[in-house]
Image: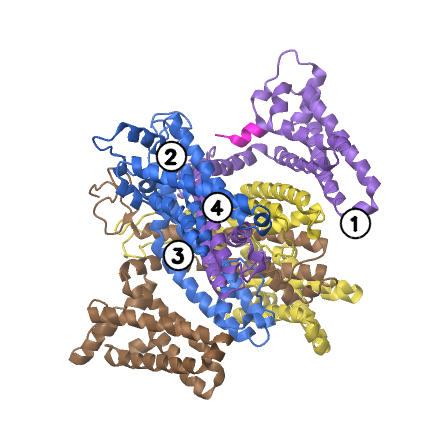
Chain colours: A brown, B yellow, C purple, D blue
Amino acid sequence: MSPIKDIFDNTEIKKKPEGFAPHRQKIHEIIFEAETTAGRLFDVMLLIMIFSSIIVLMLETVPRYYAAHKHIFYVLEWVYTIFFTIEYLLRIYCVYRPAYYIKSFFGVIDLLSILPSYLTIFIPGMHSLMIVRGLRLLRVFRIFKLDSFTEQGNIILSAIIESRKKLAIFAVTIIIMVTIFGSIMYLIERNVNPNFDSIPRCIYWAIVTITTVGYGDISPITSFGQFIASIIMLMGYIIIAVPTGIVTSSIMREDKNSMNTITCPNCTKEGHDKDAKYCDRCGNSL
Amino acid sequence: MSPIKDIFDNTEIKKKPEGFAPHRQKIHEIIFEAETTAGRLFDVMLLIMIFSSIIVLMLETVPRYYAAHKHIFYVLEWVYTIFFTIEYLLRIYCVYRPAYYIKSFFGVIDLLSILPSYLTIFIPGMHSLMIVRGLRLLRVFRIFKLDSFTEQGNIILSAIIESRKKLAIFAVTIIIMVTIFGSIMYLIERNVNPNFDSIPRCIYWAIVTITTVGYGDISPITSFGQFIASIIMLMGYIIIAVPTGIVTSSIMREDKNSMNTITCPNCTKEGHDKDAKYCDRCGNSL
Amino acid sequence: MSPIKDIFDNTEIKKKPEGFAPHRQKIHEIIFEAETTAGRLFDVMLLIMIFSSIIVLMLETVPRYYAAHKHIFYVLEWVYTIFFTIEYLLRIYCVYRPAYYIKSFFGVIDLLSILPSYLTIFIPGMHSLMIVRGLRLLRVFRIFKLDSFTEQGNIILSAIIESRKKLAIFAVTIIIMVTIFGSIMYLIERNVNPNFDSIPRCIYWAIVTITTVGYGDISPITSFGQFIASIIMLMGYIIIAVPTGIVTSSIMREDKNSMNTITCPNCTKEGHDKDAKYCDRCGNSL
Amino acid sequence: MSPIKDIFDNTEIKKKPEGFAPHRQKIHEIIFEAETTAGRLFDVMLLIMIFSSIIVLMLETVPRYYAAHKHIFYVLEWVYTIFFTIEYLLRIYCVYRPAYYIKSFFGVIDLLSILPSYLTIFIPGMHSLMIVRGLRLLRVFRIFKLDSFTEQGNIILSAIIESRKKLAIFAVTIIIMVTIFGSIMYLIERNVNPNFDSIPRCIYWAIVTITTVGYGDISPITSFGQFIASIIMLMGYIIIAVPTGIVTSSIMREDKNSMNTITCPNCTKEGHDKDAKYCDRCGNSL
């Protein structure tokens, strides 16, 4: 029922085992909880470190910056890597169930965000994989009003999970359609337009067109090709309504289920929160 | 009520006639049913053949690959064609009602997917028509949890069928609008912009614009042209909401109809499956 | 309540005045009604004439075709103009209330579709205005199942009319937003990018971007410009949800109002047509 | 409950203090109210001034116009600035609670719209900030049927505020997605495509693609890059459904709450206005 809750706030991992050393308990509170000042401070600092590490990683790929500040980038990278490694080891040290944490969603992400740095010592190409640190930003929702955000996130995720079969059918239909459209355009344009020189590229064009992205790097030049392209576009225009309809329908159902179904007897307002005791428009008792 | 059911799982064709030969019955089970291990294996193998044949067909059109592996492509094509021909003949041989199968949706698709190969012996241009094999991929839904997928597919299809009149009115309105917009832009841009040199091409531009595809191969260059184009874009922005609204409204109604209307008396959750006996949130009996 | 009904099927105009000449009544039946074979034939022929006249008009603007068939286009144009003039005069002659017809929606369109041809004798530029004939295609809905189509068209139109205030507020907000976004981009890009050389052009860019059309004829080249453009795009991504939400909400309400609110007591299906007496899923009496 | 009402029509500011001078009261009626002829005239004139001042400001940035009419632009700018300054001072003079007005939404906008002109005397670059005058156009809703427009605006604003948490989660998810997609494309294309030369630019490309804007200034050229881009586009196609679903769901709830929940006992029409006493379809008493 609550996929995001499991990721952020698993109760299993929260049961304190007996005989847990007090100094480990203290570190546990700082790292895993946000109620104390120290815990809150740690969370904020961690987010700043994650965010700045990603910014540094991006800027490093800009040739201009890299050429000018090569050494600074090298030093910063290892500062971040060592910081995140210590943080990872501390988490394992002070978590109640280390095995559970290591296999958890954030446990894997935490490991993946430090591994590439060490791998680059042996294999040069691994460097760019560090961008996986981006996923660590998901921790942002932990700090501010966790419950209310995860509840809303659950609604979105549940809606997408609920409509996964419809979306799969839709995706397969789209793939078959772009295959056929791409092939038709290949037959029409191949002799005059060097951009339509193979079916895979024509399918790429069909996807660019039907999703309304429309780069324009490949576009029909024959009158008949433009005519067929127009039909594909108009079909894509109506087809885009289908996934929207599917997801909207699911979100509305989830929204409704997540809410109190009691209508205010005084002002008839609907859609109160699950735990509301009074109408938030007229103050009447529900 | 169930358009997809008819295509995949027609009951008429499933009635076994009396005096049906046992060896034909055995082949029938392998080809048409997925309950036995052999039947399941056949289905998976068939899908692999269909999928790989399409990939081969596409790669063949890439000049680089074709030049390098001309003979392999030629051999592979005939391997696929002969395989699919045998499969088609076997289907006719072991189906309970051959005439019914041949005229059915998949019967026609199966024939169309082998015909072009034979036609290319006489007429060279037919080759690319083989891409119709893509439609055979629709069989993918047959293997895994057929009923649940077709039910979801029926909801989408029913929603589109239900809203076909609204979508037709919308399509005609759009066609009239792009005709008028294209003509206006022709009057404005034709003297200075060689891309706006005829009304059909201006209509093509209007379609590219109003569907928000926006290739950029044709775009206004005069200030007034850009002003009018801006108005068309903003209108298109709001107009795109119409088909979405139409389809969403239909999908929601179909979703609702496909569900149990009973609200859980304990936790008030709605939207249970048609055959649900207990609430999937609180376990209460419905 | 029924805006399209008024246009297509006004009852005022349908009251036969006393002493109406029989031969005028006969022409009236052919032109204005579709029940008789002659009337149906006339409608089909008229649509063919309208449709082909528009095609001819478009092809005439294609330089290649015009150069080759100049005289044919000239002749065809006058054939259409004379045909539509006779039709217009016949309509005035045989309609029950000529004054009412002339001022009606289709009366004005009918006149506007022949006027430009005569005007070109005196003023050359008027020629392209003939494209207004496109509006005559709206008659297409008259032939097949009129009532059911106009009912669906009314739902769409009523939904748009109902949400006109929300859409107006949205449109004004968008116009203010693109003005501000365009000005910001002007400040950022003007010194390095010749395409961002004035605020009106930057606003044009902002509209092209926020509507997700994205021609690419004008695009930011500075890093900061691309950063701001990214924010505008992500905002546009969420903003596009607003008109869709507005129109969807209205269409659903109109859909619901246009339907029978009775739920089938047997299978709980909802959403039956207004005049349904039996459930179309289980056949139960409603 | 009514965010727009607060901005346009704050009741606090409307309480007339005792001993308010009659001539100030007279100016107050002209400027702040639209019931009298003079007040209405003032409002219309003010809007014309605001609108024309923005047009002038825009045209000034067009090099061609500026070169030709440099002096006219200079004079016009100071005419507008002086007019708006007098208007601002008059507002402070005649408003019941000056301090409240100065800190209010429109009070700040009014000041910001005149400040840049004076600042340009000392700092040349400030000139373009005058475009903030655009926000003054929001006053447009004050003139015509204020209450009904603000009610509709409140529905939109409330819907967006209500779904702010879902939209925030969605925005963060999108930002993480484009970061990862951009990095993947950087790894694929960087060696062959000079446009994919840094991760920030690749993220810009990912945003341009996932929002379906698709300029085409940067597009993949390798087969594998186009394949990954196709997957990103198809994902973006389905992802765009999420914000639409979120906002649509909220707007429908707000629409419902803003309406009378009474169903007409005669014709079962729903969705009457809050203060409706009779059904607007059949005239039955509600």
Density class for disc 1 (Cα within 10 Å; few <14, some 14-19, many ≥20) is: few
Please provide the residue range marked out in magenta: C1-7
Q: Earlier in the sequence, mark 4 or mark 1?
A: 1
Q: Chain of mark 4?
A: C
> Label 4: how many residues lie within 10 Å, few (<14), some (14-19) or many (20+)?
some
Identify the residue shown where x is 68% and y is 26%: C31
- Gap between marks 4 and 1 measured at Cα: 41 Å
Q: Which residue is mark 4?
A: C175
Dot 3: element: helix
Magenta stretch prevailing secondary structure: helix
Residue A159: image tag? 3
Q: For the residues carrying marks 3 and 1, which lies nearer the camera in this image? A: 1
Name the amino acid, label 1: Arg
Q: Which residue is mark 1?
A: C64
Check disc 3 and give the amino acid type: Ala
Question: Which residue, given by chain and number where applicable, does mark 2 sit on?
Answer: D146
Label 2 or label 1, whichever lies nearer to me, is 2
- Taking the magenta stretch, the answer to whether it contains residue D253 is no
Q: Height in image: B228 above or below B40?
A: above
**In this picture, is B101 found above or below D79?**
below
What chain does mark 1 sit on?
C
Q: Give a yes or no on whether discs 4 and 1 share a subunit.
A: yes
Q: CA distance from mark 2 to mark 4?
A: 20 Å
Residue D167 occupies quadrant: bottom left
Q: Is residue D27 above or below residue C255?
A: above
Mark 4 against mark 1, which lies toward the viewer? 4
Please provide percent x and percent y for residue D40: 40, 29
Determine the image quadrant of residue D270: top left
Of helix, strand and loop, which one carries label 1? helix
- Mark 3 vs mark 2, foreground winner is 2
Q: Amino acid at mark 4?
A: Ile
